[in-house]
Amino acid sequence: MSFINFARKEIAFKIVYYGPALCGKTTNLEQIHAAIVPESRGEMTVLSTQADRTLFFDFLPLKSEIIKGFTSKFQLYTVPGQTIYRETRKLVLRNVDGVVFVADSQWEKMEENAESFQDLIDNLAEQSVSIDKIPYMLQFNKRDLSNVAPAHYMDFMLNQRETRVPTMESVACNCLGVFETLNIMAKMILAAFMKENNMAMADVPDDVCL
Amino acid sequence: MQKLTPQLGKKIDEILLNLVVRAKAEAVLLCDRGGNIVAQNTTERYHQEDNIAALAAGSFYATRELARLIGEPVFRYIFHRGEKTSLYMQTTSIDMLVVVVFGKDSNPGLVKLYGDEACAALEELCAQNAASPEEHSETLELDSTKTMFRRK
């Protein structure tokens, strides 16, 4: 849920990177943190185990001046992908404005992708949020590996709801598709925010997020 | 969507300033359940307030499950004691979290005493505002000259 603070002239949006274990959620945030222009980012907080598995969440605050007179803060979170951390994922999803579902493109991960996507739907539903009512998109990650499923197969598997959502192929460890994903997500959230505030959609220039 | 008007923000700032001074704290953050900073007052500069707020909200609300397991609806206070600097968190009935950072000039009893008072004042203020909400009208406009997230 976006938060407008007229007193501090700030608007805050929350983006959650969701997906199965080891699909590349943390890598997305690490690449953004490393490559983004410094004036747009804060410090990244990583809460991982000794084996580099996300324990609680990762957090990266970004900011933009896209709304006149206000600082727009986009707060990026990841969730722990391992099945046992379901309660933690529910916690991180609280007040979410948009979700990037990171799917692992390897054939043997398709079942985990489907389970994780259903887990996302269920966890949102427990907070009385329908996935069809919030901005979300799919990122097909690890496209550089040899044993990947075709993108159209993954699209068929994960993108069959009433409204089809944007997809992006990526190699997060090389930063390919990472910024494109972030900017598509930010643009979707902004569009939803504008609609809610009766701002004219025509105000959005085509290249605003590119 | 949550909104905070400048008038209400000013009143909240006064409550937080009062807490900082009387509890001899270094920083006070008021966060919502999503980890957003609603208001803050700091005597020393903390450069990562957003990270502190996100972690504080995450860790505080994670304890709700712990509370449930021992038959409590919620823990109202959490206190982390450090060598030089400590952290105190208190929830309010308005589903906001007060985070107080304090050093050796203060102590947990003092912080809890004035933390209780500040939370009560915030709850009363929000109840008044809910009964007669302040109107605030401000046009939001996109800046088409700005890009969003670019690489270096």
Image (cartoon, coloured by chain):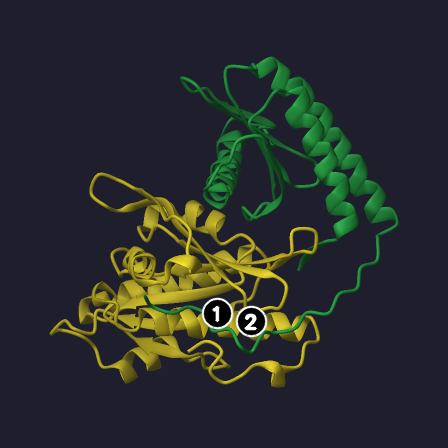
Q: CA distance from mark 1 to mark 2?
A: 6 Å
Q: Are marks 1 and 2 in contact (CB under 8 Å)?
A: yes
Pinpoint residue B44: horizontal percent, then vertical percent.
53, 31
Is residue B99 visible to the viewer in this orientation of the structure? no
Up-down relation of residue B83 to residue B135 (above or below): above
* Residue lying farthest to the right in this orientation: B132
Q: B78 left or right of B129?
A: left
Instruction: Report the residue marked by disc 1.
Output: A186
Amino acid at dot 1: Ala
The front one of A188 and A56 is A188
Disc sitting over residue A190 in the figure? 2
| Label 2 packing within 10 angstroms: few (<14), some (14-19), many (20+) | many
Up-down relation of residue A187 to residue B125 (above or below): below
Counting labels gives 2
Pinpoint residue A5: horizontal percent, then vertical percent.
66, 54
* Residue lying farthest to the left in this orientation: A146
Q: Which chain is yellow?
A: A
Which residue: 47% across, 50% down? A92
Q: Name the quadrant containing residue A160.
A: bottom left
| Label 1 packing within 10 angstroms: few (<14), some (14-19), many (20+) | many
Disc sitting over residue A125 in the figure? none
Chain where mark 1 sits: A
The front one of B48 and A21 is B48
Q: Which chain is green?
A: B
Pinpoint residue A40: horizontal percent, then vertical percent.
43, 60
Pinpoint residue A26: horizontal percent, then vertical percent.
31, 55
Amino acid at dot 2: Leu
Q: Quadrant of the N terminus of chain A?
A: bottom right
Secondary structure state at the residue bearing disc 2: helix
